[in-house]
Image (cartoon, grey):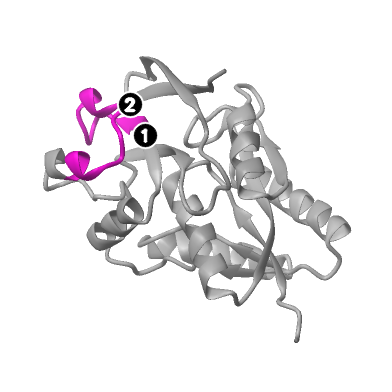
Amino acid sequence: MTPRPPALLAWSGGKDAAWALHALRQRGEIDVVGLLATISAGTERASMQYIRVDVLHAQAAAAGLPLLEMRIPESCDNACYEAAFAATLAEAQARWPGITRIAFGDLLLADIRAWREALCARLGWTALFPLFGAATAALARDMIAGGLRAQLCCVDTTQLDIAFAGHDFDLALFAALPATVDPCGENGEFHTCVSDGPMFDAPLSLVASETDLHGGRFALTDFALGQ
């Protein structure tokens, strides 16, 4: 048999990245050999989801994959991000010679997809989007039916009430969301932290702390590994 081409997967610790991993494994067209997480150096957390680094590593271990850390300063412009991205992809190629593919869990935002594709192309890589264009309401229900378990770890309070912070990503959430909010939070309404799913060998025990409001806008619920 012809070996499947190796690929990285951009890993946020959230549901879309996790489900993208599951989808890629189900399709069997590429071999995901590692996860790439963007870490804010000042906080030691995922840059968007605000998930702890040790939780990201625990998720990667549950998925049976190594985690590459791409570290960026808290104030990072495009040039800074692109330099860090290029360096991390070079690290990946040193580890897996010949690797030139990286997948992302983006769903609907065409401008973000185009930017990723252009950046990857400049670096000699191909960007893959296994979930792109999916109907988010149906996708969200497929995730739940498929065994994915996650909680809302970040809520943009300009788009969704702070009371949703820490809520399970479940059917009760979908029923309670305002009609203006995408069921997968694709417009930045919320981000999630995954604790279980078909992409993991075993569930993670995560303990939620109190929710804090950052920058007067983002309600962040911290999840730590339980004992």
- Expressed as whole percent of the image width and height from the top left, the position of residue 92 reads 79, 55
Q: CA distance from mark 2 to mark 1?
A: 6 Å
SS assignment at label 1: strand
The vertical placement of 12 against 91, above or below, is above
Horizontal side of 190 relative to 79 (left or right) equals left
Are discs 2 and 1 less than 8 Å apart at CB?
A: yes
Residue annotated with mark 2: 166
Report the amino acid beneath label 2. Answer: Gly
Name the quadrant containing residue 75: top right
- Tell me if residue 53 can be seen: yes
- Residue range corresponding to the magenta coloring: 153-174
Horizontal side of 65 relative to 25 (left or right) equals right
- Expressed as whole percent of the image width and height from the top left, the position of residue 78 reads 59, 47
The vertical placement of 23 against 153, above or below, is below
Asked if residue 159 is among those painted magenta in the image, a careful observer would answer yes
Give the mark nearer the N terminus: 2 vs 1: 1
User: Image quadrant for the N terminus?
Assistant: bottom right
Tag of residue 151: 1
Say which of 58 and 105 sits in front: 58
Name the quadrant containing residue 95: bottom right
Report the amino acid beneath label 1. Answer: Gln
Q: Residue at x 48, y 65 (%)?
A: 23
- Tell me if residue 74 can be seen: no
SS assignment at label 2: loop
Q: How many marks?
A: 2
Q: Residue furthest front?
A: 202
Say which of 216 and 27 sits in front: 27
Q: Residue at x 53, y 20 (%)?
A: 226
